[in-house]
Image (cartoon, grey):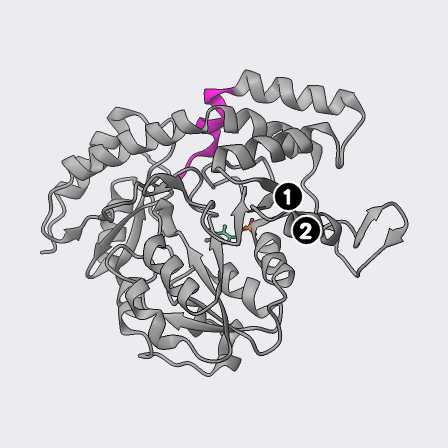
Amino acid sequence: MKIKANDLKRQYDLYADEYDKAAIQCLRSGWYIMGPALLKFEKDWAQFIGSKYCVGVASGLDALWMAFRLLEIGFNDEVIVAANAYIACVMGITLNGAIPVFVEPDGYLNINAEKIEEKITSKTKAILAVHLFGQACDMTVIMDVAARHSLKVVEDCAQSHGNHWQNKRVGSYGDISCFSFYPTKGCGAFGDAGCIVTNEKQIADAAKVLRNYGSEEKYHNRVVGVNSRLDELQAALLSVKLSHLDKLNDERTILADRYNNGIRNENVKLPIVRKGADSTWHQYVLQVKQRKKFINYLLMHGIETMIHYPIPPYLSEAYRNLGYSKGDFPITEQQADEVVSIPIYNGMTREEQNYVIDVINAYDIG
Ligand SMILES: *Cc1c(COP(=O)(O)O)cnc(C)c1O
């Protein structure tokens, strides 16, 4: 059997007629940028998350750097972020001239919130809470630390579309929350898209100006802005996906539960979910020593895997200027050496999953 690491065609197939209809309706409408489909999606997404405002932008990275810009966090300000986060999280900080300050992750592969306070200095302006792999950070501790030190909180929910911390969805906690609708994300588009979510009207209004050349009214440019808009076609398709998102997330939970209950191999560490959080299982991340051997073994049996992520941002070439070196964050580096994401996607069959489970359970380090 051949099993791909991810298969987006399967997810499209689940509601193909609805996507086709929405796309054709948009094409035939003659309105392609900043129209009714965007307004509808923004309203529905804000409501889904449980916040007041949503502003569509062109990508998750744009949402991130615009969030810090909107909070007036820039040159030489410090922002606290998990050392094992995705590199776009760090770019969202540094594109504004701000400095990322890294904190080690915990056993749930998210920022160790108990270690944030010791990193706070007079230059610290914000905490970027990245809800990695579909699971919430400990927002109780993060919101408490932020309140005590008057810091802003930005949430990166790119991998967490709809899951909760306690009784609220992630994205409803921070001053600004950032979403990517990149095709592989929970509510994935059919191209690039993203948004910010906030409860503050002033921030939402400023975001609408920033994304559109700094103008609210055509040819009246209040500030220097950018072109970062979520187009009508993507918005229309996203509305279809949003209408099924809870179901899609439930299906992923069932898939993850099968792995949780089915995989039994002492060489393989399963992911765990923190009390107070649920997961939308953006990835199902195992930790395995001698990972290369494990990956090759799976590949030999037709099973593809991915690594999220092999190089921590502070060790990447792009951030050589930050002056970090190997050994600076040992927990992060151990995870980077051991994590491996196995196939989990909407439309995956029970037969395929049983095959993956059987192959993993038969793995012998030798
Ligand atoms: C995907 C992702 C981003 C970037 O989103 P793009 O839409 O690809 O720019 C940022 N942060 C996290 C955690 C992501 O997974």
The verdict on label 1 being within 8 Å of ligand 1 is no
Name the residue: 32% across, 63% down. Answer: 113
Label 2 environment density (alpha carbons within 10 Å; few <14, some 14–19, many ≥20): many
In terms of image quadrants, where is residue 93? bottom right
Label placed on residue 55 = 1
Q: Is residue 295 above or below residue 128?
A: above
User: Which residue position is annotated with label 2?
Assistant: 207
Looking at the image, is mark 2 or mark 1 earlier in the sequence? 1
Report how far apart the C-alphas of labels 2 and 1 lie in the structure.
7 Å
Three-letter amino acid code at disc 2? Ala
93 vs 233, left or right, is left
Residue 212 at x, y percent in the picture: 77, 49
Residue 77 at x, y percent in the picture: 55, 75
Segment colored magenta: 5-15
Three-letter amino acid code at disc 1? Val
Disc 1 is placed on an element classified as strand
Name the residue: 60% across, 60% down. Answer: 65
Q: Main secondary structure of the magenta part?
A: helix
Q: Is residue 311 visible?
A: no
**Decide: marks 2, 1 in contact (CB < 8 A)?**
yes
315 vs 303, left or right, is right
